[in-house]
Image (cartoon, rainbow, N blue to C red):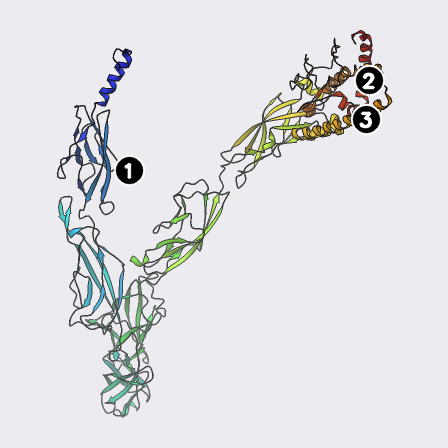
Amino acid sequence: MKHGQHYPASLVLGLVQVCLAQANFAPYFFDNGASSTNGNMALFSLSEDTPVGSHVYTLNGTDPEGDFVTYGISFESNSRNFFSIDPNFGNITLIEELDREREDEIEAIISISDGLNRVAEKVLILVTDANDEAPHFINTPYIILVPEDTPAGSSIFKIQAVDKDTGSGGSVTYFLQNFHSKFAMDRHSGVLRIRAGASLDYEKSRTHFITVIAKDGGGKLRGDYVVLSATTTITINVDDAQDTDPVFVGTPYYGYVYEDSNPGSEILTVVAVDGDRGNPNMVLYSLVNGSDEAFRINETTGGISVTVSPSQLKKEMYELRVQVSEVGPRGRSSAAQASTTVTIRVVDLNNHPPTFYGENGLQNTFELTMYEHPSEGEILRGLKITVNDSDQGANAKFNLRLVGAGGIFRVVPQTVLNEAQVTIIVENSAAIDFEKFKFLSFKLLAVEVNTPEKFSSTADIMIHLLDTNDNVPKFSSDYYIARIPENSPGGSNVVAVTAMDPDSGLWGEVKYSIYGAGAELFLIHPSSGIIYTQPWAALDAEATSKYNFYVKAEDTEGKYSLAEVFVTVLDVNDHSPEFDENIQEKTMVLGTPVKIEATDHDAEEPNNVVDYSIMQAEPANVFDINESTGEIRLKAFVHSLDIIHNITKNRDCTWSVLVQAKDRGSPSFSTTAVLKIDILDETLSRGPMAAFLMQTKDNPMKAIGVLAGVIAIMVVITVFISTAMFWRNKKSNKILPIRRVIRKRPSPPSRSIRAEWIKFKRSHAGDKFAVKDELPNDNHNNNSLMFSPPPTAPALPPPPITIPKISPSEWTVPTVSGSLTPKHIRKPMKQKALDRPVQSALVSELKQKFEKKAADNKPYF
């Protein structure tokens, strides 16, 4: 302030307050370091296993002036709010569960305020690890194929498990759950190998199942030290190699020669198979010794027959040495061979029925567990069945057959003499299906052949089946048809597809996927098969109403099937009817309807079907509307303009009608519009001028253009005529009589009366171009655009008191853009009067009256 200068007291007080406000310092946080639990959260870290609801930190600060401070914490818009705060005490509480594997740091904005100043700081909160993740095996299931001649100590597979934790909790070691004599695993690398000194044998065990445990290094979780683990199974299938000699089936062999046996009759059949069942060779049979020329063997079938009469047999028992040799794929003999002893006895009594034995003696029920779909020709080695008939000779001969097996198995041998080892061989692998039968049961029947007694016995065989992955997932239908409303939000369910895999366990689990040109707007849940729309998808039946794409069902080994999905987008009534742009004004000729149109852009009926109705009209009960076509017509009793004038005092015959267009959807939408209807009597629309006015009513610019053209032509003609008359008078030196000028002066009033009469008689369709008198103009300016309202009835104007100047422009006809003089339009009006006799007669009568009154007022001129 200048010395001696005075200022208002209010201004001085304001300046003091400003100074005081500027002296208020901002509050600040205390920085207590990383190990502190209060302050400004500098270097603050929090374990991911902290329970929700725990008090984790206290914001602490102060204000230099000692004012009360409040605290706040906020997060970025794209981040979750992990903490809440007490604004008064600064206590921060965890409200969202932490997961370091998902988010290992949190950005937050903390603030402190004293009411006037607010200080905000961005802090980074570290989320520390806890041992909350168990190891997870990847690329499961583990199924491997190992040749049986793989050397001992060889590495055959490497297993891998991952743990998302850090430190010791993220390290993984591997163990075999149970000690296995053939396999060992490196605890650090997960490499599986064959133990030193061990070997694989396809003929003894074709499949091995090993359970592996993966453990992490342990760590703290919610205050306790825990070690987490996971298990998985490795299936090891052994691949066969040619390393085994042939094997006789059903040993020991016993045959019997009855005293009534004929020479050449078969005693028994020996059966041998290549010990390498994965790729077996053909075998040939031969007798080495012990036959004494009394027996022979079929080299391909193994059938042993007696060559002499039983009476010529010198021994009661013969021991034959049978040898079997393998033949290679090209018919070459192989070194692989085997031999067995066949005991043949000579008997002659029948007093024992066939009897079945197991490993522990007499047995009538046998059980076996095996996988489904074994190879055809495979022997059921788990069944140890021996059948015996203690008689001698033909009395001990019996047949074996299976009852109830349905061609799935066959029994070897089919004919037994005295005693044999029973072998059951797979005949129909496809019928051994776990999905159809969990177990198979049938009977083994032994019936004597050539005895009158026909002694027999039976044994029950029960086979329990184990599942394999032999089925492809199959959809419940080859195609699915779904419908969804177009206003469904993103993420709406469309249809659920279902595929079944009859296999059990992991092989029966189905994973769904979706693809195809029409699948961009859809997703599918991989396990439930529910198809739903993308979160951002916006369906529109008016744009695209049909979609089709494919879904795929796949099991864990990649077997899959496909189905096609057809989706129809259902139309929803989401558009209101819209009137045409030219609905504001219509001209109606008596007896002829006018039509309004509205369009609904919905895709289907009834949503796009529009009904019309009149909501309000002034006056009421005059118009009818066709609710389907939108045609508006006058009621039957309104058939002339006189009736209209009796109904309403509105003389211009323009009525406003409030119309409604309403669709038939649910819910229904409607649109209203105000329609102005000009009523025109059809008797006034017969002439060319009325027709022109009707055509240009809704297009005034067209009328303006036509009238401007007419004016231009009339001006040119007038100039031409005036010039010609000027030159003619100049040559003849004659002056026109004054009487001619005086006789033409009354014509403007006559023109005015005629214009008033025409204005009353014509319809509203021509009102835009009606002839009107102007207000009195002292300056005689006939170009004024201020029109007077139309008269209610024809009347004669008062005669003019003085006419200072004789001018053709004294009486004008107003138009849209200007005024026209009677002189220019007198000739067309006379021609029009000739077309209408009644109007012409009335105009002539009025003209005579004006001329008479003009003669009476002659002194004025």
Q: Nearer the viewer, mark 2 or mark 3?
A: 3
Q: Earlier in the sequence, mark 2 or mark 1?
A: 1
- Disc 3: which residue: 724
Please identify the quarter of the rendering in which residue 501 is found. bottom left
For residue 281, above or below residue 730: below
Three-letter amino acid code at disc 1?
Glu
Q: CA–CA distance between discs 2 and 3? A: 31 Å
Three-letter amino acid code at disc 2?
Ser
- Disc 1: which residue: 76
Q: Is residue 850 left or right of residue 243?
A: right
Please identify the quarter of the rendering in which residue 577 is found. top right
Q: Earlier in the sequence, mark 2 or mark 3?
A: 3
Name the quarter where the N terminus is drawn: top left
Question: Is there any visible trace of residue 353 in the rendered image?
Answer: no
Q: Residue 573: horizontal and vertical position, in percent? A: 50, 37
Q: Nearer the viewer, mark 2 or mark 1?
A: 2
For residue 539, above or below residue 279: above
Q: CA–CA distance between discs 3 and 1? A: 94 Å
Question: Which of the numbered marks, if any, corresponds to residue 844?
Answer: 2
Which of 833 and 254 lies nearest the eye of the viewer? 833
Name the quarter where the C terminus is drawn: top right
